Image (cartoon, rainbow, N blue to C red):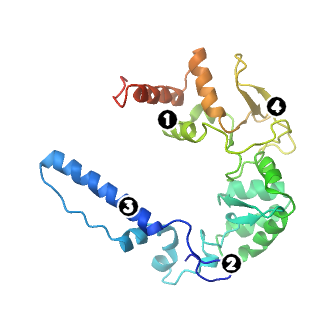
Amino acid sequence: MTLGNDGKPAMPGIPAADVLAGLQGLSGVLMALLRREQTGLGDHIDISMHEVTLGGMLNILGPAFAENRQPVPAHERTTGGAAFYRPYETLDGRYLVLAGQEPKFIHNLLGAFSRPDLAELCLRGPGPHQQPVMDFLSAEFRRKPLTEWNAYLATLDVCYGGCGGIWFDATELDRVDARAATTLHSIWTLPVSSVKLNEPRRCPRCPEQVLDRKWFSERKQVEIDQCPVCRGIWLDAGEFTRIYDEMKGARLTTPIWAAAMELIEQYSEAGGNRPNV
């Protein structure tokens, strides 16, 4: 299933069988220790590298189990058959990766490129019929170097891991749950790459509407980008954590995600002892 553009087997960058077997082995040891603690009985652990690798292939086993056919790597969802799940070369010989096939990402990017007519091909699922979309995106991304695409894609609501920022529709930030807050806090401690923050950004929801750069609160410590029409908010990499720190220091109204972060901080400072809830 791991083939290069020439159709020949390619050397994977990650030793998947080794890594998966190690993780399964760790899980087995932990479960055995728990069983010993609860029952006083030991356990036997037997890990098969082949079986754990098969378990890690769930995203590509569908054709074999559901359609009784051999998967064709170039036509499947995560191995080359989807225009919005593949790398693209840029003008400077570097690469960017699109990694989200949800309809909103497809409509947002193709709409920004003035080719909304191609969305229907993507929405039909993976397969050779998506080749016109791949050809178009390949030609489009070769027009600019990667740094320019980083700055441009940061203004769109697409699944692209370049700048580390994210778009929140109106009220979405207030409704972030504790689990999501923990993830956002951990991955947004530092920016992943530089983006030109002084360039105007356009709202992904309101065509041609430029976002307003404003302070998050009266303390004037964190700047955010907000659409004056739909009230959506764009946060750059690191700004979620800085907002949490500002709210904590200013004793502002605390949503559930900020309260959860406070408990996590208490847990860390206590050396792993569970905080009082």
For the residues marked 1 and 4, what is the alpha-carbon distance in whole angstroms?
28 Å
Q: The C terminus lies in which quarter of the figure?
A: top left
Give above or below for 107 relative to 187.
below
Label 1 belongs to which residue? 178
**Labels 3 and 4: the sequence-earlier one:** 3
For the residues marked 3 and 4, what is the alpha-carbon distance in whole angstroms?
49 Å
Give above or below for 197 relative to 160.
above
Residue 100 shows in this picture: yes
- Residue 274, percent across and down? 34, 29
Q: In this view, does 252 lie to the left or right of 228?
A: left
Residue 5 is marked as 2
Q: How crowded is mark 4: few (under 14 residues within 10 Å), some or many (20 or more)?
A: some
Q: The N terminus lies in which quarter of the figure?
A: bottom right
Q: Which mark is nearer the camera, 2 or 4?
A: 2
**Labels 2 and 4: the sequence-earlier one:** 2
Q: Residues within 10 Å of mark 2 (few under 14, many from 20)?
A: few
Residue 212 is marked as 4
For the residues marked 3 and 2, what is the alpha-carbon distance in whole angstroms?
30 Å
Q: Which mark is nearer the camera, 3 or 1?
A: 3
Label 3 belongs to which residue? 22
Give above or below for 174 relative to 201.
above
The residue under label 4 is which amino acid type? Asp
**Residue sticking out furthest to the left:** 40
Q: Which mark is nearer the camera, 3 or 2?
A: 3
* Residue at 32% across, 60% down: 25
Q: Which mark is nearer the camera, 2 or 1?
A: 2
Q: In this view, does 221 lie to the left or right of 12?
A: right
For the residues marked 2 and 1, what is the alpha-carbon distance in whole angstroms?
42 Å
The residue under label 2 is which amino acid type? Asn
The residue under label 1 is which amino acid type? Ala
For the residues marked 3 and 1, what is the alpha-carbon distance in whole angstroms?
29 Å
